[in-house]
Image (spheres, grey):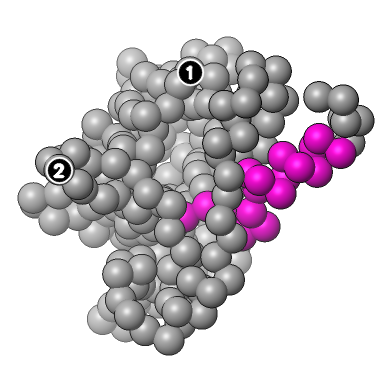
Amino acid sequence: MELPGELRNKLYIECLFDDDPICIVSKQSSFRRFAKRVPQWPKKDPYSVNHNNNNNREQQHNFKSLVPAILALSKTIYAEAVPFLYSQRIIVQDNHALLNLVAALTPLSAALLHDITITLWSETRAQRSVNFPAMTVLAARGVTNLTRLNLDCHVSGDYNPKNVAKQIYRDCYHWLVAVGEAKGNPYAALDVLKVSEFNFYSQYGGGKRLNGKELEEAEEEMKQELRNLLNMI
């Protein structure tokens, strides 16, 4: 604590911050599920962290180890340093990982989260039931200060913007409402919600990719439908 604040901040960055996003997957040990940080996986294969390929070995080599134990040194250091850990960009493999990550957060750390990307929306009959509780826990823990929630995945098998909105509302309405209440604007969550363009056209079966104007129109149609749904509450 005798060091100048600028030097302490440099130490906090070295211990707690990674220039690359923090990538989180769900793991299980002794019948307990938990969130674990892993090297970043290739964009189009979110499960490749479990593969022993050359690309993954290179990422392992460049994987920066963080030292969160520094947060336990004192209450003062915790208060100064914890924003460096939780305010950086976080990518979760799927909603299982999101649920396990957020469930373990304190209200303070939950409020510090700024940028979350979800790379897989659970779609199978056995797994999609986790989408609603994951987003509900996000609301219950107070994760309402996000500057971006990026659904970088297929949310719905239907590529109609209104039906994409209905799926998002069905799974996320507790979080949508919680952000609105926290910000004093019922539509505030729509300002931070980003949805992959793949939701608006089929990349299988020869689906046509949207141009810039068409994509803007599809996104606005989706958000307008979300506003209509929020007005029904």
- What is the secondary structure assignment of the residue under circle 1? helix
Q: Vertical placement of 49 versus 5: above or below? A: below
Q: Residue furthest left?
A: 126
Work out whether residue 95 can be spotted.
Answer: no
Residue 107, labelled with which disc? 1
Which is nearer the eye, 127 or 163? 127
Q: Residue 22 in magenta?
A: yes
For image coordinates 33% across by 80% down, the residue present is 52
Q: Quadrant of residue 114?
A: top right
Q: Vertical placement of 63 versus 104: above or below? A: below
Question: Where is residue 42 drawn, in percent x and y?
Answer: 44, 73
- What is the secondary structure assignment of the residue under circle 2? loop
* Three-letter code for the amino acid on which mark 2 is drawn: Ser
The residue identified by callout 2 is 30
Q: Vertical placement of 155 versus 204: above or below? A: above
Q: Vertical placement of 66 versus 189: above or below? A: below
For image coordinates 37% across by 19% down, the residue present is 140
Does residue 214 appear left or right of residue 15 in this picture? left
Magenta residues, start to end:
7-23
Question: Where is residue 125 drawn, in percent x and y?
Answer: 8, 51
